[in-house]
Image (cartoon, grey):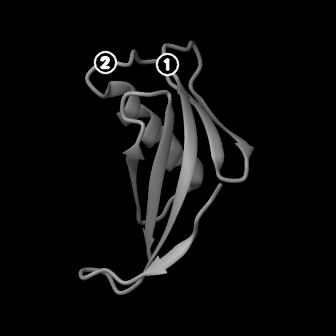
Amino acid sequence: MCFPSIGRGFDSPISHTMHLKITVTTETKKESVREKKAGEYAVAVSVAPERGLANARALKLLRAHLGPSKRVIRIVSGHHSPHKTVLVEESV
């Protein structure tokens, strides 16, 4: 489920934020991002889930999939789980 909101930060004039749910599959032959339904994505990465490498790769693939803009994407829950909640913040 997607939770859009608008907030004012101290450094940026206005930012739009939303939460996405992602499921990460590690050590796959082919990397991909596919939307399962609105606000939910399946991300396949080729790296092992060690030292945060799979999380970093999943965020990089998701950022590329969502398109070019000034986005900040970070994991807010599920750091050690395949099921994660990700915060996407975009400055306007």
Q: Where is residue 89 in the image (x, y as percent from the top left)?
A: 43, 65
Left or right of residue 33: residue 37? right
Q: Report the amino acid beneath label 2.
A: Glu
Considering the numbered disc 1 on the image, is that residue within a helix, a strand or a loop?
Answer: loop
Identify the image quadrant of the C terminus.
bottom left
Q: Report the amino acid beneath label 1.
A: Thr
**Residue that mark 1 sits on:** 26
Q: Where is residue 30 in the image (x, y as percent from the top left)?
A: 59, 19
Left or right of residue 58: residue 13? left
**Residue that mark 2 sits on:** 50
Left or right of residue 90: residue 50? left
Q: How far apart are marks 2 and 1 (CA)?
A: 10 Å
Crowding at dot 1, Cα within 10 Å, few <14 / some 14-19 / many 20+, comes out as many
Crowding at dot 2, Cα within 10 Å, few <14 / some 14-19 / many 20+, comes out as few
Q: In this view, does 16 lie above or below 27?
A: below
Q: Position of residue 20 (x, y in %)?
A: 56, 51
The earlier-in-sequence mark between 2 and 1 is 1
Q: Do the residues labelled 2 and 1 touch (CB within 8 Å)?
A: no
Q: Which residue is drawn at 33% across and 26% down?
A: 53
